Image: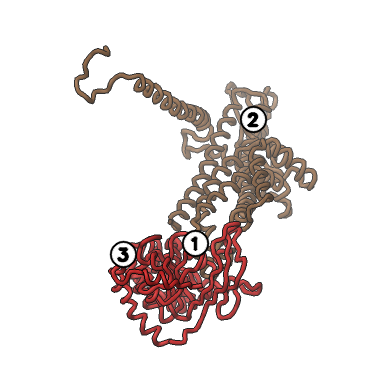
Amino acid sequence: MASNPPAHPFQSPPTAARRRERWIFALFGGATYCVILCGALVFGTIIGKGAGSVFQTRAPFINTTFLTAAPESLHVFEFEGRKREMGDQEYRAFVAQHPAAARVKSESYVYSAGGIFPCIVGTVLLVIGSMTIALTLGVSAAVYLNEYARDGTFIRFVRLAILNLAGVPSIVFGLFGFGMFVIFFGWNVSLLAGWFTLAFMVLPVVITASEESLKAVPRGFREGSLALGATKWQTIRKNVLPYALPGILTSSILGIARVAGETAPIMFTAAYVVRDKLPWEVERAVDFLFQGVMALPYHIYVVSSKIPQNEYTERVQYGSAFIFLLIVAVIASASILLRNQLRNRYKW
Amino acid sequence: MVTAAPTLMETRPAAPVLPPRPPAAAEPGPAAPASALAPAAETLIDIRQVDFFYGASQALHDVSLAIEHKKVTAFIGPSGCGKSTLLRCLNRMNDLIDGTRVARGTIRIRGVDIHQPDVDVIELRKRIGMVFQKSNPFPKSIYENITYGLRLQGVTNRARLDEVVEKSLRGAALWDEVKDRLDASGLGLSGGQQQRLCIARAIAVEPEVILMDEPCSALDPVATAKVEELIQELRSRYTIVIVTHNMQQAARCSDKTAFFYMGRLVEYADTRNIFTNPANPQTEAYVSGRFG
């Protein structure tokens, strides 16, 4: 085979290097497709199984109960020859109408009826509050580190601390928040404690990314502004921060997904397994900050591992996971839109 | 400082070495009357025996020179000779770089030592505008670029801002090119227009001095010519200090030229003398293109 003379000078000879290249390409390509496959499997499962509890075949095609009601127990019983499934409230009304139904043996499954509205509200509140805190603290710290502070031992120490903070497991943040905010500050299990715990968790990401975006702003913009007689703060506010904002937002999108999804930091600090009242049903405005909330990731955890599993729980498990993905996607796309708009405004 | 060695003066070849220069040297024609009109030149910036350090390395050695009011002073010299460093000392832009210091000597502007503790560097920079090597219009509209300095000073009166924008753009010979698109981004302009926009931005705050740090080094010849024309127009109203690599440019634009080498001021004299009759052999070698 090797002795065959080539048909023309440019014919590719079957050398070992070429064979190896083909193998390597196949390997890299295969790895890439594996990633896609994993993603497709995860999302496909959640969407496939979750869509059933969110969408329905009858108008309005969206299961509004699931989105707007609180979780309830599901009652399953046979009455007048028909198998009936209904949520707790509906069941009580039904029993009041048909006293005979009270004598029928009914099985009840917790959390398997109703919806997840309080969890959605809680998660959104947690994300908004903690991202506000994280961005305020993080951007301020990044501006200080990048624009004001002179490099020295202290600053190196601060950077080391930030790196270390990024490596701390989320459950440790949860315990820290519990010890610090819940017990020491006496905030109890509350929105405020959750906000700060989550904010501290994403702080390293926000600081590092903000610093990178500040560094990406050309030096000439700062010098040009200072040479016109601007103070350092005027320069930063008018001629540095606006251009760094798109980059900062990009990083916070990552932060949003983490804040929304982490269960460990909020399970001791902010999340309730179940709560009847919605967050705005408070007597005094200040109570708003000091109330626990239901949250989607914690709810998923509870319905997946803390209650007896049966054919009815899957509905709420996958439904919650699906809605959770949807919320993160919506918040993230909003940030991306905002970022793109800012980016178009300031281009260099 | 200016040590003229007579023996070397004699060895200097006469005219033949500078054939392209005579026209260039003759071109400061418009400059000549200006200097003739003001025989007793007033010193605006007085630099005395300045030593300057970047950390441990010394960038300026014992530099002394007096920059005259409403004249164009050019700093020339090979890369790393300290000319930009000195320029950036004049509005204390070097303060922004860590580890820099003026170790010795004084820089006085109108008799005031600018390193005096009660000198506000913000006020100083308002009075001494700067144009950078790389044009740096802000990624905002042309209008916002020009009004940036005034808005910092709290001017919000729209009519006044409009007036300043037109005046500054006319002053920078840019008005006719951009008057229909003041709301367009300053970054959409060509390289030469961007640099003139930066000059317009600098003159919008009415400085006394304009420092130009190699303003044409990134521009093509046509844009360079426009900026040079602009310098000719500005010279009657501002004191201009220009750092340049381009000796013809120094010869064309400036009244006085300072030649720097290795952080020292080698020679400082009328531009005409520097280019036709330099006192120092190093200057002579540099302006005739034999080194640097």
Q: Which comes sooner in the sequence, label 3 or label 1?
A: 3
Q: Quadrant of residue A110?
A: top right
Q: Please, what is the three-letter code of the amino acid marked with disc 3?
A: Pro
Q: CA distance from mark 3 to mark 2?
A: 74 Å
Which of the two marks, 1 or 2, is nearer to us in this view?
A: 1
Q: CA distance from mark 1 to mark 2?
A: 76 Å
Location of mark 2 (residue) = A303
Chain A drawn colour: brown
Label 3: how many residues lie within 10 Å, few (<14), some (14-19) or many (20+)? Answer: few
Residue B95 appears at what percent x and percent y?
A: 58, 64
Q: Please, what is the three-letter code of the amino acid marked with disc 2?
A: Val
| Residue B200 visible in the picture | no
Residue B174 appears at what percent x and percent y?
A: 35, 72
Residue drawn at point x = 48 percent, y = 59 percent: B80
Q: Quadrant of residue A79?
A: top right
Q: Secondary structure at mark 1?
A: loop
Q: Secondary structure at mark 3?
A: helix
**Chain of residue at mark 1:** B
Which of the two marks, 3 or 1, is nearer to us in this view?
A: 1
Residue A197 appears at what percent x and percent y?
A: 69, 44
Towards the viewer: A292 or B192 = B192
Location of mark 1 (residue) = B262
Residue drawn at point x = 44 percent, y = 74 percent: B73
* Same chain letter for marks 1 and 2: no
Location of mark 3 (residue) = B221
From the rendered image, report the letter of the chain displayed in red.
Answer: B
